[in-house]
Image (spheres, helix red, strand yellow):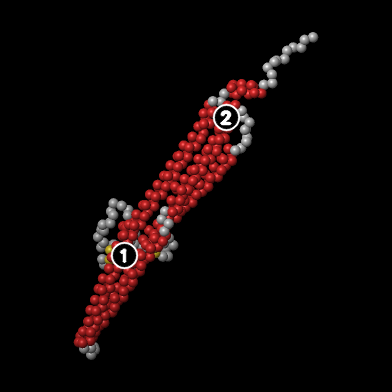
Amino acid sequence: VYSLDINCVTFPHPDTMQEQQLLKPTEWSYCDYFWADKKDPQGNNTVSGFEILLQKQLKGKQMQKEMAEFVRERIKIEEEYAKNLSKLSQNSLAAQEEGTLGEAWAQLKKSLADEAEVHLKFSSKLQSEVEKPLLNFRENFKKDMKKYDHHIADLRKQLASRYTAVEKARKALTERQKDLEMKTQQLEIKLTNKTEEEIKKARRKSTQAGDDLMRCVDLYNQAQSKWFEEMVTSTLELERLEVERVEMIRQHLCQYTQLRHETDMFNQSTIEPVDQLLQKVEPAKDRELWVQEHKTGDIRPVDMEI
């Protein structure tokens, strides 16, 4: 026995199999490791190797969608944070602080408005440069996957149909051979009045059955060869799409971190004027200015005379 049929696909028999050369020996490529079917987790049904690859693609699309949803939540947080910062910047608390400290305090409140603007821009860029590309990448992805699925599934059904025809032809040949053998034996031991003509007829039918089997096997091998070629082409395409998907997400997550760094830098710039004014706060000068503005008189009291 040189081959083994599993789910209508012919594989080399493990006991006689010569070592096969991988199509892409230096890589763990899709095209080398998904030829056989696999039982589902419940062990009730089998899933084709190609179906497993399709499920991987669809799961990747779902992960991509969930990442976009995550970024959307981040955007909401930024928008809410910016709104609260802007509201706080307009708060009148400590608005009557005077002098250089008053100037620093006013600048600190203004910096909140500037920071709010930074976070609004960050949220806007997150939406246009990260969330939207993640959502829009391969909008027709599921439709394309269905095309792959149907194409390979149709080839697999054709292969199964050809396999059934081979089994039917094999069974027919066995029956014709048995019939010929039985009639030949009966003729030899004179247990029947079968003529040579009937033996020839049985032999012709046996030969025809053999020819039919060869034709069915040839059609089966053609179908399996076509399925093999399409499997290689399709699995390599799915592999390319997965590499492309991962690289696309990596680039947009890098864009996220870049925007985050820029936001930190801009936030730092909003606080620098506050730092500069705080360095200029002079308690003595503030006291001098305040006294000059609010003094009530500089003549001190003296002792009362009799």
Residue in the picture at 26% in, 80% down: 176
The image's mark for residue 103 is: 2
Work out whether 60 lies above or below 181.
above
Q: Quadrant of the C terminus?
A: top right
> Hey, what amino acid is under mark 1?
Trp
Q: Which numbered marker is on residue 227?
A: 1
Above or below, 260 relative to 281: below
Q: Nearer the viewer, residue 270 or 197?
A: 270
How far separated are the C-alphas under marks 1 and 2?
A: 78 Å
Residue 192 coordinates in the image, percent (x, y): 24, 89
**Which of disc 2 and disc 1 is earlier in sequence?**
2
Whole-percent x, y for residue 224 in the image: 30, 66
Q: Residue at x 53, y 47 (%)?
A: 76
Q: Is residue 273 left or right of residue 46?
A: right
* Residue 282: % across, % down: 57, 23
Question: Crowding near pointer 1: few (<14 within 10 Å), some, many (20+)?
Answer: many
> Callout 1: helix, strand or loop?
helix
- Position of the N terminus, as image quadrant, is bottom left
Q: Which residue appears farthest toward the bottom when viewing the image?
A: 193
**Which x, y percent locates residue 91?**
61, 37
Asked if 304 appears above or below 222 in the picture, the reply is above
Q: Is residue 283 left or right of residue 221?
A: right
